[in-house]
Amino acid sequence: MNKPLISPSVMCAPQWQDIGDVLRIMKDAGVELLHTDVMDGHFVPNLMLGTAAVRQLRRISPIPLDLHLMVERPENMLDWFDIQPGESVSVHVESTPLLQGVLTRIRDRGAHPVAAINPATPVSAVEEVLPDVDGILVMTVNPGFAGQKMIPQTLDKIARLRSLLDELGHARVRIGVDGNVSFENAVRMRRAGADVFVCGTASLFSGQGTLEGNIARMRACISGTEEKN
């Protein structure tokens, strides 16, 4: 499997006024990506981070953004976000009939295209775009709100997706997981084949322990080095 990566969900950070300090802690702890949710109130019943907020976050972040566009017709919005080389950009297969075109435009900007799938969307929905992506983001909860419980059958979905990627010669394609990525669930997700972990209120920002300590613990969980009690 690919090296596991941690992508903290910035919408779950408890104190936005201290976001610069939070970002420095993450960078010093070796965090690879910064998961940045964009919600339009239509594709999901919530609003989160407009273009100005994303650009401001990009300006101060020492960590590449991992943009997650939970929006209808993302092809109409890509230019708004000034996507930069090295960033990751997830678009939902359910959000557009022009998925391959959107993924191509993301890659043309030097960014990593990722196809996201909701819990009820079958793995087969991404098979035709595997040559066009660097990752598949598996939603392990229904998108739109933090604090939900993982839908149990998504673990089998991750395993089936990993098998499909290996079978079709796309082992390089990363599998991200987003939703209730607790320390315990992360271990199970990793065993199933996930390698990018979007972490929020169930782990890094749980209010228990320090951010540095929680990042280290998550790293141990997904690397298979956490001590067993």
Image (tube, rainbow, N blue to C red):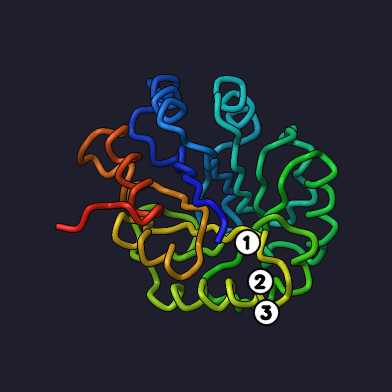
Q: Earlier in the sequence, mark 3 or mark 1?
A: 3
Q: Label 1 belongs to which residue?
A: 136
Q: Is residue 124 left or right of residue 11?
A: right
Kind of residue at disc 1: Ile
Q: Secondary structure at mark 1?
A: strand
Q: Is residue 199 left or right of residue 107?
A: left
Residue 7 screen position, x and y as percent: 49, 44
The residue shown at (34%, 62%) is 185
Kind of residue at disc 2: Leu
Residue 216 screen position, x and y as percent: 33, 40
Q: Label 2 belongs to which residue?
A: 165
Q: Label 3 belongs to which residue?
A: 124
Q: Earlier in the sequence, mark 2 or mark 3?
A: 3
For the residues labelled 1 and 2, say whether their Cβ atoms are less than 8 Å apart: yes
Real-space Cα distance between discs 1 and 2? 10 Å
Real-space Cα distance between discs 2 and 3? 11 Å
For the residues labelled 3 and 1, say whether their Cβ atoms are less than 8 Å apart: no
Q: Depth check: 52 or 34 in front?
A: 34
For the residues labelled 2 and 3, say whether their Cβ atoms are less than 8 Å apart: no
The residue shown at (61%, 27%) is 58
Q: Is residue 104 left or right of residue 212?
A: right
Q: Earlier in the sequence, mark 1 or mark 2?
A: 1
Q: Is residue 196 above or below residue 166?
A: above
Graded by Cα atoms within 10 Å as few (under 14), some (14 to 19) or many (20 or more), the crowding at tag 3 reads few
